[in-house]
């Protein structure tokens, strides 16, 4: 059977861009068990409450990501919310650890997907937004949408 190619999205953290100011984005591999991979291939995972961290030993971990138990698994099935190791290069881990030393910064997962058959997670260094930041972003998005709509109406009548 040929290896699958391309990117297949499994889970996405849609609220992350609303709740956080996104900084550097890094793609990381995951250390998974066999039943976790089977569950991911079924498209069953959530990363809305998950976050990542770098420990003192210089290893990166994904915490609180929910990959449900494989329904056809045996007694060797995995636990749903276990801590999973992230696979990153040493320089990437050091860079992330340096950025996390600033106060108010955290590592959040943006997406969980298969890239050419390998499970990957996209993590970002993020800073939490205040309520007024969120309201300003919504107002800017609405103003941009209204401007594009007005421009489309104007262009439609100018072509005649």
Image (tube, rainbow, N blue to C red):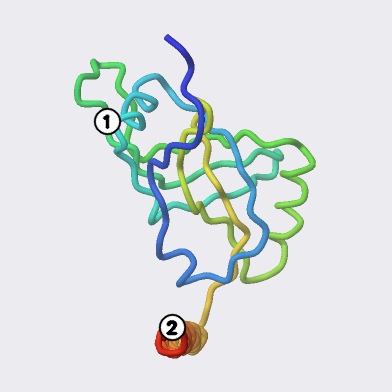
Secondary structure under tag 1 reads: loop
Label 2 sits on residue: 152
Q: Measured from the top left, where is residue 21 in percent x and y? A: 58, 71
The residue at 30%/22% (across/down) is: 77
Q: Residue 23 bears which disc, if any? A: none
The residue at 31%/37% (across/down) is: 43
Q: Residue 69 bears which disc, if any? A: 1
The answer to which quarter of the image holds residue 9 is top left
Q: Measured from the top left, where is residue 88 in percent x and y? A: 67, 37
Residue 82 versus residue 20 in the image, above or below: above
Residue 9 in the figure: left or right of residue 5: left
Camera-side residue: 125 or 57?
125
Badge nearest the viewer, 2 or 1: 2
Camera-side residue: 103 or 18?
18
Secondary structure under tag 2 reads: helix
Q: Measured from the top left, where is residue 30 in percent x and y? A: 53, 33
Residue 43 in the figure: left or right of residue 4: left
Instruction: State how far apart marks 2 and 1 are (Cα).
Output: 49 Å
The residue at 57%/34% (across/down) is: 29
Q: Residue furthest front?
A: 160
């Amino acid at each position: 059977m040929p290896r699958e190619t391309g990117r297949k999205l499994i889970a996405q953290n849609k609220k992350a861009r609303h709740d956080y100011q996104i900084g550097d984005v890094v793609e990381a591999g995951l250390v998974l068990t066999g039943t976790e991979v089977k569950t991911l291939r079924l498209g069953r995972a959530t990363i809305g409450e998950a976050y990542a961290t770098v420990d003192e030993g210089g290893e990166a971990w994904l915490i609180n990501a929910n990959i449900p138990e494989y329904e056809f698994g045996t007694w060797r099935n995995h636990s749903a919310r276990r801590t999973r190791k992230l696979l990153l290069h040493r320089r990437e881990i050091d860079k992330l650890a340096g950025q996390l030393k600033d106060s108010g910064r955290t590592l959040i997962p943006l997406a969980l997907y298969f890239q050419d058959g390998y499970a990957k997670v996209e993590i970002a260094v993020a800073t939490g937004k205040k309520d007024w930041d969120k309201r300003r972003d919504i107002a800017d998005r609405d103003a941009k949408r209204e401007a594009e709509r007005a421009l489309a109406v104007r262009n439609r009548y100018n072509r005649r």
